[in-house]
Amino acid sequence: MMTQIRRKHAGNRIVELFEAYLLNHAHGLFSSLGRLTRTPFTSAMTVLVLAIAVSLASSFYIVVANVEQLTGNLESSNQMSLFLHEGITDAAGQKLMEQLQQNPSVAEVKYISKKQALEEFKANSGFSDALNALERNPLPSVIQVLPRNALEHSEDIEKLMADFKQLPQVEFVQVDMQWVARLQTIMLIASRGVLLVSLLLGFAVTFITGNTIRLELQNRQDEVFISKLVGATHAFIQRPFLYTGFWLGFISGFLGWLIVTVMLLILESPVEKLSTLYNSSFELLFLSFSEFLLLLMISAALAVLGSWAVLHYQLRQLKPQ
Amino acid sequence: MLKFEHVSKRYPDAGEALTDVSFHLQRGEMAFLTGRSGAGKSTLLKLIAMMEQCTRGNIFLDGQNISRISDRKIPYMRRNLGLIFQDYKLLNDRTVFDNVALPLVVSGYNHQEVARRVRASLDKVGLLGKERKHPLALSGGEQQRVGIARAIVNKPKLILADEPTGNLDPDLSAEVMHMFEQFKQVGVTVLVATHDIELINHLEHRVLTLDKGHLVAS
Ligand SMILES: Nc1ncnc2c1ncn2[C@@H]1O[C@H](COP(=O)(O)OP(=O)(O)OP(=O)(O)O)[C@@H](O)[C@H]1O
Ligand SMILES: [Mg+2]
């Protein structure tokens, strides 16, 4: 009977401890937010600096994503352009085109005469007056060749290219894929660069939050000492500070997202205009919802990490006297 | 309850503050710790409160050796102590209620239990009507009583007070001492460091006297 009562009592104490623990967390979460609003100027400055770091990283990211989207469309095309010698007549050019059509590796061919090339260039470039002033047409005739899809390997493409180069009518061959490949390499470097810069900015978020928390800890030294003297654990003491760090990161993440989104909105209409000028269906890419959530999570996590590192170190140093 | 065995404390580049101190306080015993300024009274209390570590010897609190206690265990051990300071060490941006509740909150008591115990504690020191006030709106004697209420709210086994009457007039001092005697009545061990010889002579309790770090009378 007695042990039963005692056991029940012990169970109650555990439930009580757990309830108090949850309540303590909830209290920490909201009181730390309240504390931030009590020093609005300082908090706003910190959050703004953090938000700028977050928005820098994410705008680099979104720029690269947009350019990648653009180059992604080009990926499938490995179209070749065969530039013909100056002296080749249209008739000879047409004949060569028909001959190329017979090649089993070739899917499609298109002949563009010097004249057509000039017309097209005039229409698209906006230099028509300047081009009219030219005495003679500087553009060569071109045969555009689209290889069969089967030719995905670059060796096959290169072999075909070498064959075309042998042709006496052809001055030189250009594979569009080459510049696509180059562009893609550049994009690879760019996205690595974005990763490195983001890493750096992530460190900035971590350190700025850590330093803010360090100052906050100094301001509330008395509270820390007294709490320690009445038996508070480090976990208990650091909880509100960690929540402060969390809020700093979370709000900055949101604000950073807002900054990037506003910038993209400002850019949207000129980009659209440019896109129609180029007959392109390009649409500006915004941060997706999952990317937005990820951004919030990462900036909150980095801020908490920075706070935790500082607290872990500083709470040991702070000894009541 | 509290046992010192050949305890010495040396502060780095400040010489020895305590030298070979041994004594034993029984459960429910009340004692004064006295001596001149710089004799080592505060140092001795700090060793018990685990705010400092002794350089040599052993200190037993309720059978546990606290002289080599790990940092992780200190908070739990401190919950058995009630600490009272000359400068009260209250949080001035919190109400009297919140100040007294702090030891319970850090130990994870629920709302009702906290409220119940804080009221009981404030009642004991005669401050029941002042829960909503802030410490700076109280007199020195009242602030000290808030400090005392905070020290007893956790039902500690040992109360340590460092110059608790240093800032109080004789009447208030006598009142505070009377409170300590009441705690002793219910089985709490009380150790009070003080200069106030008159007060000590007036009350009949054990007196531990320190002189330059040596325990010369107990
Ligand atoms: N943190 C410290 N670092 C170095 N020396 C210290 C420290 N605290 C105390 N001391 C030295 O230890 C000795 C004892 O100091 P303590 O504070 O224990 O004296 P006390 O008896 O409480 O004096 P008082 O009556 O003035 O409060 C003194 O010589 C003091 O200078
Ligand atoms: Mg002292």
Image (cartoon, coloured by chain):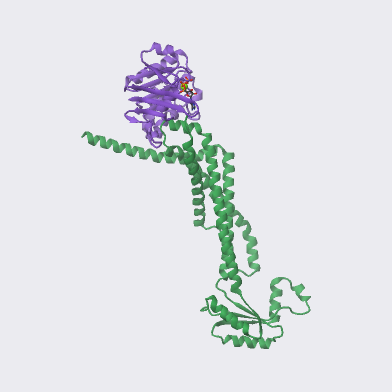
Chain colours: A green, B purple
Image check: B28 left or right of A59?
left
Q: Is residue A185 left or right of residue B151?
A: right
Q: Nearer the viewer, residue A226 or B96?
A: A226
Q: Quadrant of the N terminus of chain A?
A: top left
Q: What is the tally of numbered marks visible in this picture?
A: 0
- Residue A279 vertical placement versus A311 (above, below): below
Residue A97 appears in which quarter of the rendering? Answer: bottom right
Above or below residue B119? Residue A45 is below
Compare residues A272 and B180 and report the one nearer the observer. B180
- Identify which residue is drawn at 64% across, 69% down: A278
Residue B146 in view of the camera = no
Residue B152 position in % (x across, y down): 38, 25
Q: Position of residue B140 (x, y in %)?
A: 49, 20
Extreme-left residue of the structure: A1
Residue at 45%, 25% (x, y): give it. Answer: B16
Percent position (x, y) of residue A95? 64, 88
In this view of the protein, can residue A307 be seen by the observer? yes
Q: Is residue B18 above or below residue A75?
A: above
Q: Residue at x 61, y 55 (%)?
A: A263
- Picture quadrant of residue A215: top right
The x, y position of residue A36, in whole percent, is: 53, 39
Residue toward you, B3 or B200: B3
- Report the side of A192 relative to B80 (left or right): right
